[in-house]
Image: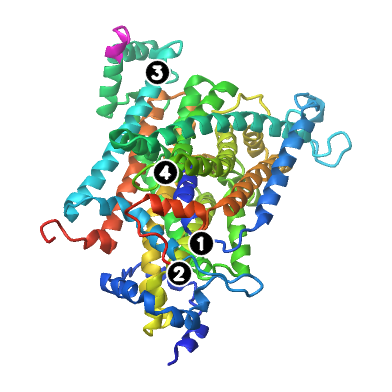
């Protein structure tokens, strides 16, 4: 839900701000471990019976052998459902990010490679779309198209492609001319994984929020948003219904953000590096780094 | 008073950032020119007096500050302004016109998407009339939107009605959709105003404190903490607060406790974002050559911070903050629904669940208008305080 922050950070702060003087691989490693853990938990959860409804076993508190993390108001195992949530969440978000990256990169490169009105229009469109909170538009679209996997995937993919377009454009357009092919390829190759990680985190949150509002996953799907919406109804009696899926959500989102930030710190061209030098050389309007 | 003494003693207080919001005093052009002219002669002075401003590794080894980073950073936001050769009024007008065009583009896109989705649904007339509409109302909607005519006419009718802000009657609320949205808007604005005030207080102080410590160990930890705090979704934070304070869905909506918790959740969402880029702009400005020159000419650290570093960095931070405020609205939808605060977001979420299409359309339009009004306000604020915008020579003077 923070789309343009990414583009802003990619376009302005990440490249230009001397925020962390020393790139810290800790963030990257921590994020990678967290993401791998999320993927593995999703695989583990695939084998568990998460849809088994047992009306005699409603709201069992955590700690029993059968249900280590308790059951929900329909008697479904919270642990199995949360683990299944990893699979559901990643199955929505990873393809959506991939589609958005493809569409966004194409548009961004088209804007950077062209001149005149083509570039102006494409840049303005990307800027406008990335500056508008896409969640506001995604919710009515899914509500009208019907809840479920397909509408969720398509809406999230289309609406999150603008930040990609903006980031790719920002990194391949050197101020006045498109940069040469090899540096452009390098810039896109370094920008894409970083932006993808941030968009991935955003889309996980967006999916949970949409499902929480009742306009995302279908009511029976093991989405964390659905689980949190149910948990809110019985929160006084059964707080574990809230904390278990919330922890899973935090693990995924924090890991993806750490991964993106760590990668960005390490791959950011520092001032004076070869990547940064051609940027100034190609732009006659810039005086270049002060030496 | 020796330079060195000030260098050592002046740890700028975090709170000083707050009052600065009221007295932004931009650096004068003359100072900047002097700074550039003298830059070449300052190498020795730089070595002796400016170690404090350089990012140091945890082991104490000093690394070279990225001198150029800040000047380019500061110029990025001003790029659009500097490009054209018109007077101030014309430039501000062009910028506002650009925002209006952006708003129009978003509204047309949104309306077209909604139209297409309504058309492919099983019964467009029932959808347009809203959930729970009577047969007479559905018939009225079919006539009103011309749903029996050719598709192009339907599209034109739909868009014209949107243009006239005529969204129709909501059967659920028994009121005009536009009237409902107008009633709910103040609640959202009050909530956002409280969040912005709190964020301005906390995030700017935090950002200034953090930005002046770039490269130190505590900066690294605070930065990671902020990144993690930024990653926590408003949904999760709000639900945890909901549980901790013992709220239930049935407890009184709109109570002071619920309002405070909404403000707290949204502030939690906004503070790390604003603090992070404030820290970045402050750190960038602190490495500028004109800061160096001012220091060499005897400015105290306090003067450096207040007259040179903060005005330049907070201008950029203000420009970046506009985007975050616009995106605050999407979190507002979730948080208002969660805490039952009767604002626009709660109206949107409720109407989505009941399928109240007229209200959904009206709310999306209103939120889009608010978003681009925020952007326009930030543009105007920048024009008012940024000397590059305010004082740039008009073509006649050149």
Query: Which sits in the foreground, A238 or B309?
Result: B309
The residue carrying pointer 1 sits among few (fewer than 14), some (14 to 19) or many (20 or more) residues within 10 Å by Cα, namely: many
Q: Secondary structure at mark 4?
A: loop
Q: Secondary structure at mark 3?
A: helix
- The stretch in magenta equals B146-154
Do the residues under discs 2 and 4 have CB atoms within 8 angstroms?
no
Do the residues under discs 4 and 3 have CB atoms within 8 angstroms?
no
Pointer 2 and pointer 1 on the same chain = no
Compared with A174, B205 (above or below) is below
Whole-percent x, y for residue B152 in the image = 29, 13
Compared with B210, A148 (above or below) is above
**Between marks 2 and 4, how big is the CA–CA gap?**
28 Å
- In magenta stretch: residue A104: no
Q: Which residue in the protein does label 1 denote? A: A18
Q: Secondary structure at mark 2?
A: loop
Q: Is residue A107 visible?
A: yes
Q: Which residue in the protein does label 2 denote? A: B287
Residue B116, which numbered label? Answer: 3
- In magenta stretch: residue B152: yes
The residue carrying pointer 3 sits among few (fewer than 14), some (14 to 19) or many (20 or more) residues within 10 Å by Cα, namely: few
Determine which quarter of the picture holds residue A71.
top right
Q: Going by the image, does A20 lie left or right of B184? A: right
Q: Quadrant of the C terminus of chain B?
A: bottom left
Q: Look at 41% across and 76% down and name the residue there.
A: B292
User: Who comes first in sequence, dot 4 or dot 1?
Assistant: 1
Q: Look at 50% across and 25% down and name the residue there.
A: A142
Residue lying furthest bottom in this view?
B1
Given this view, does label 4 or label 3 mark the residue nearer the observer? Answer: 4
Q: Going by the image, does A34 lie left or right of B181? A: right
Do the residues under discs 3 and 1 have CB atoms within 8 angstroms?
no
Q: Quadrant of the N terminus of chain B?
A: bottom left
Determine which quarter of the picture holds residue B56.
bottom right
């Amino acid at each position: 839900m923070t789309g343009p922050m990414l583009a802003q950070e990619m376009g302005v702060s990440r490249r230009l701000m001397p925020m962390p003087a020393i790139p810290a691989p800790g963030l990257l490693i921590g994020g990678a471990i967290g993401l791998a853990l999320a993927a593995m938990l999703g695989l583990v959860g695939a084998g568990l019976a998460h849809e088994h409804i047992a009306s005699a076993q409603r709201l069992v508190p955590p700690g029993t052998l059968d249900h280590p993390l308790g059951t929900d108001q329909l008697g479904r195992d919270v642990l199995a459902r949360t683990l299944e949530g990893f699979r559901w969440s990643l199955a929505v978000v990873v393809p959506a990010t991939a589609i958005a990256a493809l569409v966004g990169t194409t548009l961004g490169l088209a804007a950077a490679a062209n001149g005149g009105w083509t570039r102006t229009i494409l840049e303005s469109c990307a800027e406008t779309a990335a500056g508008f909170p896409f969640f506001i538009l995604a919710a009515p679209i899914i509500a009208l198209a019907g809840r479920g996997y397909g509408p969720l995937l398509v809406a999230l993919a289309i609406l999150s492609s603008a930040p990609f377009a903006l980031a790719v454009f920002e990194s391949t357009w050197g101020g006045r001319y498109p940069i040469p092919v090899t540096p452009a390829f390098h810039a896109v190759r370094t920008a894409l994984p970083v932006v993808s990680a941030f968009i991935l985190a955003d889309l996980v949150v967006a999916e949970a929020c949409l499902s929480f509002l009742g306009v995302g996953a279908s009511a029976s799907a093991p989405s964390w948003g659905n689980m949190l919406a149910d948990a809110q109804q019985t929160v006084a009696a059964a707080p574990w219904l809230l904390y278990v899926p919330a922890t899973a959500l935090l693990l995924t989102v924090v890991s993806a953000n750490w991964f993106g930030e760590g990668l960005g710190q390490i791959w950011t061209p520092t001032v004076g590096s070869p990547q940064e030098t051609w940027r100034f050389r190609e732009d006659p309007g810039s005086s270049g780094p002060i030496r | 008073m020796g330079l060195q003494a000030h260098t050592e003693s002046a740890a700028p207080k975090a709170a000083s950032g707050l009052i600065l919001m009221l007295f932004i005093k931009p650096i004068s052009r003359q100072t900047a020119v002097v700074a550039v002219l003298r830059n070449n002669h300052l190498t020795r002075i730089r070595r002796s007096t400016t170690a404090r401003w350089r990012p140091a590794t945890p082991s104490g080894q000093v690394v070279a500050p990225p001198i150029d980073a800040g000047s380019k950073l500061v110029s990025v936001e001003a790029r659009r302004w500097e490009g054209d050769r018109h007077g101030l009024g014309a430039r501000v007008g062009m910028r506002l016109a650009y925002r209006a065009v952006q708003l129009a583009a978003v509204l047309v896109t949104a309306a077209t998407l909604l139209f297409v989705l309504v058309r492919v649904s099983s019964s467009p007339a029932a959808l347009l009339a809203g959930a729970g509409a009577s047969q007479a109302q559905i018939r009225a909607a079919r006539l009103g939107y011309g749903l029996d005519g050719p598709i192009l006419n339907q599209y034109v009718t739909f868009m014209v009605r949107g243009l006239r802000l005529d969204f129709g009657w909501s059967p659920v609320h028994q009121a005009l959709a536009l009237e409902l949205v107008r009633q709910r808007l103040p609640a959202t604005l009050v909530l956002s105003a409280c969040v912005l005030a709190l964020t301005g207080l906390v995030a700017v102080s935090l950002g200034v404190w953090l930005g002046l410590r770039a490269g130190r160990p505590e900066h690294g930890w605070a930065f990671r903490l902020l990144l993690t705090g930024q990653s926590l979704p408003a949904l999760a934070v709000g639900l945890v607060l909901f549980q901790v304070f013992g709220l239930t869905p049935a407890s009184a909506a709109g109570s002071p406790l619920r309002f405070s918790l909404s403000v707290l959740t949204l502030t939690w969402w906004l503070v790390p974002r604003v603090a992070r880029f404030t820290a970045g702009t402050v750190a960038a400005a602190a490495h500028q050559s004109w800061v160096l020159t001012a220091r060499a000419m005897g400015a105290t650290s306090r003067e450096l911070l207040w007259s040179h570093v903060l005005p330049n960095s907070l201008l950029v931070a203000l420009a970046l903050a506009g985007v975050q405020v616009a995106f605050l609205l999407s979190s507002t939808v979730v948080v208002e629904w969660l805490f039952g605060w009767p604002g626009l977001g709660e109206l949107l979420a409720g109407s989505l669940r009941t399928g109240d299409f007229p209200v959904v359309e009206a709310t999306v339009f209103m939120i889009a208008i608010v978003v681009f009004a925020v952007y326009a306000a930030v543009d105007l604020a920048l024009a008012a305080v940024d000397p590059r915008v305010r004082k740039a020579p008009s073509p006649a003077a050149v």
